[in-house]
Every structure is written in C-alpha cells, then in structure tokens.
Amino acid sequence: MNATTDKTWEHAGLGLFITLGGLLLLLTIAAGTGIGEMSISIETTFAAMTNKIGWSAVALNPIQESVIWDYRLSRALVGACCGAGLAVSGAVLQSLLRNPLAEPYVLGISAGASTGAVSIIILGVGVGTVTLSAGAFVGAFVAFAFVALLSHGARGGASKTILAGVAASQLFNALTSYVVTTSGNAQQTRDVMFWLLGSFGGVRWPEFQLILIVVVIGFLICMYFASALDAFAFGDDAAASLGIPVNIVRIALFATTALMTATIVSMVGSIGFVGLVVPHGARFIVGHNHIRLLPTCMVAGGIFMVLADITSRVVLPQQVLPIGVVTALVGVPAFSIILYRAKSTT
C-alpha cells in the first residue's frame, strides 16, 4: 500500500511538473512573439492571437497584428518544436549508445542531413519541403551508418563513437562546402552558408504543421520504447535478457531520431548542442527514468530553443545572429564540463 501510494504521489508530482513546464513554455513562446525589433506588449500579443482564432475582437494596429501572427508566432512555435525534437533525439541517442556526449550534432547526423538538404537546394533535385526533408533524411541516415561502421556501434566505446562522429562531421561538412562552392552562384552560396548556421527567419505556418506532426509522432514512438531505453543503460545483453528485441528497437529509434533531425535541419539548418545540453539538465531534475526524462526534455528543449531565438534577435542591434551561434556559445562550455566529468569517472 505504501509503495502504491508513493508511486501515485510520484506520478502526481511528475504531472504537476510537466504542467508547470508547459505553462512556462507557453509564456516563453509569448515572450518570443512579443520581443523583437518592433517591441509589442504581451497584452497585444495575446489579443492578436485570440483575435485570429476567434476568441476575441480587440481593435489592434494591423501592422502589429500581422507581425505577431504571420511572422513571430509561427517562428516561435517552430523553434519550440525544433528544440523539443533535438532534445528528445539527444536523450535517446545517449541511452542507446550509453554515451553522455552523443547527440545528432556531435555524431555527424546534422552534418549529413545538411549535405542531403543542400544537395537538393543547389543541385535542384526536386522542390518543396517534403522533398527537401527526404534528402535531409537520406543524408542523416548515411551519416549515422558511417559513424556506426567506424565505431562498430556501442561496442566501439564512448570515445571511439565520438571520434567517429567528428570524422563524419568533417566529411559531410566538406561535401556540403564542395556542393555549394562548385554548383551554387554567389547569392545561393551566401544564403546557404547563413542557413547552415541555423535560422528561423524563413519558417511560417506550413513548416510548423509539418514539424509538429514529425516531432509528436517521433516523441510518441520514443515514449513507447521508454522502458526499453531504461534497459539499454545496463547493456544490450541485459536488455535482451528482459525480452527486448534489441536490434528492432535500435533500428526503430535510430530511424526516428534521424527523421526528426533531418526534418529540423531541412527547415532551419544545423543547430548544435541542444541535444547535448538539455538531456543532461533534464536528468539532473527528474533522474534517468525515460518515462519522466523524455517529456521533460521535450518541454525544456522547446523553452531553451525559444530563449536562444530571442537572444539571437536582441543581442545585436539591427541584426539577427544565427541561432547556431547562440546554442554553441552555451553548448561548448557544457560539452567541456560533460567531457571532463566523463573522463574523471573512467
């Protein structure tokens, strides 16, 4: 009875925590919608949103209303979805590989997705967001296969996996640069290189609809395998002894993280370190149980990315800093701390 009561209180506490986190995410999105070159009050921001969905009819400045609904709100929502997807992908990869430094950017998956997406953009092989996402997915999957071959999967060890990821990043970044410099004109080269550093400037409602579907489906798949991810912490043999189909789960989760990463990269470019920093922060708060960890990563990743986007728009007057620069300024020190701690425990 006591154990049942404790579990009930634990679930209630988790529910309250996720609810509060969701409210904080909504407030962060509202802040991201109101803050910018044209400062808009939070009252006007909420009024514009409720006007558009038919909940109110407040008289507003048409320009401000258009900026909020047609530009900033979709941008903030896409940013939240991208942060959530990258954070969940990082948590899953760290568990599958039993490597605290694993994440799509460090393992070269983002670089591979960038190569696939840029090949579509510059070489003109197909048009449209879906085709671009497909090219990014192929690049992401090829990059991960390359890393797996170099490191022999989890059996290669943490350091070998990271070294393989560094090699994959360098290789696919070089291929991307080759495609851009040999096949693109000056304007295409400038636009692509800025996009590769990460930018939410071109996203609108169609992109939000697609990324929302991909991230929600990916999150549900990862949650379905949450217990299996807990078992992977003790190794493949331990997971198999519990009746988990190791190879099937591994392939399903790798494909899911590759799909989420590829979709994000195809829309906003390669944004690093979100999948590294957020899962470790979430583990510090809720522990290693993936039933708690994955929802926390989703909420915290969304908040982190929206805050990074706000920073990118306000840190330099009259300029927008690439979002990847902001996340790197936070992620590199965190990466160094995690690497030092991992070294000290070996």
Image: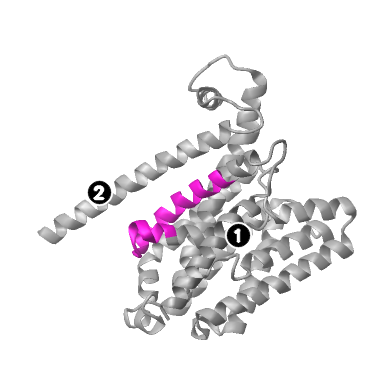
89 relative to 74, above or below: below
Please tell me whether residue 117 belongs to the stretch shown in magenta.
no
Q: CA distance from mark 2 to mark 1?
A: 34 Å
Tell me the residue that label 2 is attached to: 12
Secondary element under disc 2, as helix, strand or loop, is: helix
Q: Quadrant of residue 245?
A: bottom left
289 relative to 215, above or below: below
* Quarter of the image that includes the C terminus: bottom left
Instruction: Return the mark for residue 272.
Output: 1
The residue shown at (53%, 85%) is 156
Secondary element under disc 1, as helix, strand or loop, is: loop
Q: Quadrant of residue 345?
A: bottom left
Q: Is residue 183 in sight in this rendering? A: yes
Instruction: Return the mark for residue 211.
Output: none
Of the numbered discs 2 and 1, the one sitting upstream in the chain is 2
In the rendered picture of this protein, how many numbered marks are placed on residues? Answer: 2
